[in-house]
Image: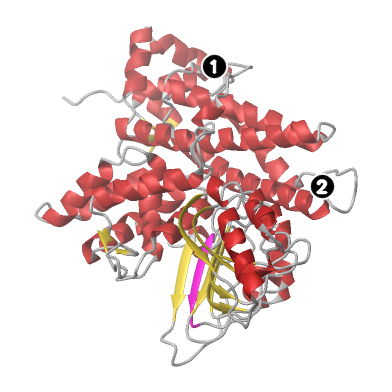
């Protein structure tokens, strides 16, 4: 004789194995009859969401039948452990991003204390923070909570963009008006955040601490890694597709699992953007990681480049990267990824696309042609709404692409033909890295890209834009050769990389501009040193205080007097 069917199944519909749908609130949940009773009884517990639409009669009946607290615990423990782990991981990643955003908004609020929109944003983010804290503490893994987390992640992306716009407007207007007031907070994003908070009541979550302690030391990254390597359960499904005998992939998986730092996993997965056999320069890769927000420092003593160097060494030690080309002195100047490792990176990066199959989730895109033809490229406006990295090889670049990809953080343009950037490049206000090969002139409009961290130009460049000193967040200027001097480089106080400095005699072009660049490191070539007046002016460059491992000093070759050589010696002593 079979087991008697529980009467409470009359109030629910059997869905897939181990799931049911409530006939009152139409919510979909994991579990069986005991869990249905807990749901209808309106008693919240671990992973149990109270039904808000049940009639009083049925609720009373469910409470009477529910029994002891022991049964409630049994209902709670019936949820899948893997789902609970995934939800906890997702909430942790979003928590990191929100803490980073709170720090940024707090800084802006301190500077613009009368701005109500900023205060409201700060309050809302703090409220979501403590709600997430409750979800983590209780290990909630309900399907509705996962849906809520997905919505929250999308809104957090939009908040990042809004904060970029705030920073852009701040830098754009700081020299035009004495009293700066931020624009009204984006109503769409505010509405979405309010909806996120309002949905909490139906999820069984609550604010467990109205005054949470947010440690800024815990800020690790400002980007959720689920966008890069796929949601964890999708990655796990990908592993299941692998043959147990595939020893190479299993070893790679073991190494990948041993990467305990989530941001390091994101950095590794990001390497999928490079084609097979691509010669990866260490500094270039680290600058890409920076631009994507993977290297936000957790301590004031560390800079992003230091974290990137640490991550790069770990990937090298794990054999995810191998030594490539060496220079004439035997130093490794580039690295490469083995074909098997590259296939592995593609697997973990594309595991999410097998289920979503939509371009709107793509964050990195490489488009390459052989150079025999140079076709134009067109995209639908709603295709790549979350695209952050775009790399184009031998492809025509025009205003249309700029309009479609306003969220870009990394833009790389290279190939066989000369490139011309349109003046409308300044619409890419989120851009952190601009990498171009084969361009003679840069439009002055790039000096409005106030979030730009890295400018890489391969090939001969006539001169840098005249207002380059506006880019106060610029950290790396990587150029092969330049003819004319650049004005007021000393204002770029974040600058670490400057391979060439052309000395001039006029104010703003003199060698003392180097003295203000306290973070300058690596190598530098200084040309036109005959324009330095004396030893004292040479000392103003403060080269001895900088972490330089290679220094090139150049005087223009011409017919010169004996006195000139005496002056050159004094200048050399001053340097």
- Residue lying farthest front? 562
Judged from this view, the residue extending furthest toward the top is 68
Is 500 placed above or below 518 here?
below
User: Is 184 situated above or below 47?
Assistant: below
Residue 389 colored magenta? yes
182 vs 71, left or right, is: right
Pick out the residue farthest to the left.
245
Which is more N-terminal, label 1 or label 2? 1
Q: Which residue bears the numbered disc 1?
A: 57
- Find residue 516 and report its horizontal and vertical position in percent: 66, 49
Q: Is residue 497 above or below residue 83?
A: below
Instruction: Identify the residue position indicated by label 2 in the image.
Output: 183
Look at the image and tell me whether residue 281 can be seen: yes
Q: In percent of the image, x 74 and y 47: which residue is there? A: 166
In magenta, the rendered stretch is: 388-394
Q: Nearer the viewer, residue 410 or 96?
A: 410
Residue 552 point in image, percent of width and height:
50, 65
Label 2 vs label 1, nearer the camera: 2
Question: At x 37% / y 7%, what residue is drawn?
Answer: 68
Residue 20: percent from left, percent from top: 39, 34
Q: CA distance from mark 2 to mark 1?
A: 52 Å
User: How busy is the neighbourhood of tag 1: few (under 14 within 10 Å), some, or many (20 plus)?
Assistant: few
Please tell me whether residue 296 belongs to the stretch shown in magenta.
no
């Amino acid at each position: 004789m079979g087991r008697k069917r529980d009467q409470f199944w009359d109030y629910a519909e059997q869905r897939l194995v181990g799931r049911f749908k409530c006939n009152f609130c139409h919510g979909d949940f994991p579990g069986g009859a005991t869990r249905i009773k807990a749901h209808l009884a309106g008693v919240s517990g671990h992973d149990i969401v109270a039904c808000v639409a049940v009639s009083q009669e049925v609720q009373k009946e469910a409470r009477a039948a529910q029994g002891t607290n022991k049964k409630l615990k049994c209902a709670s423990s019936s949820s899948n452990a893997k789902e609970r782990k995934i939800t906890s991981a997702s909430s942790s990643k979003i928590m990191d991003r929100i803490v980073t955003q709170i720090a940024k908004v707090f800084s802006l609020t301190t500077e613009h204390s009368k701005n109500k929109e900023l205060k409201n944003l700060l309050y809302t983010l703090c409220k979501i923070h403590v709600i997430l804290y409750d979800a983590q503490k209780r290990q909630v893994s309900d399907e509705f909570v996962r849906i809520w987390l997905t919505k929250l992640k999308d809104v957090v992306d939009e908040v990042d963009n809004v904060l970029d716009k705030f920073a852009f407007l701040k830098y754009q207007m700081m020299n035009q008006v004495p009293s700066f007031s931020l624009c009204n907070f984006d109503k769409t994003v505010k509405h979405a955040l309010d909806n996120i908070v309002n949905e909490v009541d139906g999820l069984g979550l609550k604010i467990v601490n109205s005054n949470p302690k947010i440690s800024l030391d815990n800020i690790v990254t400002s980007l959720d890694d689920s966008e890069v390597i796929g949601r964890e359960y999708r990655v796990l499904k990908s592993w299941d597709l692998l043959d147990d005998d595939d020893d190479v992939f299993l070893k790679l998986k073991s190494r990948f699992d041993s990467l305990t730092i989530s941001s390091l996993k994101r950095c590794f997965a990001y390497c999928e953007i490079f084609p097979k056999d691509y010669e990866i320069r260490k500094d270039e890769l680290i600058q890409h990681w920076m631009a994507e927000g993977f290297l936000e420092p957790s301590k004031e003593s560390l800079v992003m480049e230091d974290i990137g160097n640490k991550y790069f060494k770990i990937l090298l030690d794990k054999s995810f990267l191998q030594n490539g080309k060496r220079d004439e002195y035997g130093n490794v100047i580039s690295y490469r990824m083995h074909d098997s490792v590259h296939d592995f990176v593609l697997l973990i990066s594309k595991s999410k696309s097998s289920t979503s199959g939509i371009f709107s989730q793509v964050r990195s895109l490489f488009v390459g042609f052989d150079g025999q033809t140079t076709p134009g490229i067109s995209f639908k406006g709603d295709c790549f709404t979350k695209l952050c990295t775009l790399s184009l090889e031998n492809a025509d670049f025009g205003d249309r692409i700029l309009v479609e990809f306003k969220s870009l953080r990394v833009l790389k343009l290279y190939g066989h033909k000369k490139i011309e950037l349109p003046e409308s490049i300044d619409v890419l206000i989120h851009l952190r890295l601009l990498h171009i090969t084969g361009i003679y002139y840069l439009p002055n409009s790039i000096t409005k890209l106030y979030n730009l961290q890295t400018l890489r130009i391969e090939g001969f460049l006539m001169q840098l834009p005249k207002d380059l000193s506006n880019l106060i967040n610029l950290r790396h200027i990587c150029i092969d050769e330049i003819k004319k001097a650049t004005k007021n480089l000393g204002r770029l106080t974040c600058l670490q990389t400057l391979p060439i400095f052309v000395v001039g005699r006029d104010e703003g072009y003199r060698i003392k501009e180097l003295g203000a660049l306290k973070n300058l490191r690596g190598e530098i070539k200084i040309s036109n040193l005959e324009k330095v007046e004396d030893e004292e002016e040479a000392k103003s460059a403060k080269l001895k205080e900088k972490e330089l491992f290679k220094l090139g000093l150049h005087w223009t070759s011409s017919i010169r007097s004996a006195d000139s050589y005496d002056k050159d010696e004094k200048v050399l002593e001053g340097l």
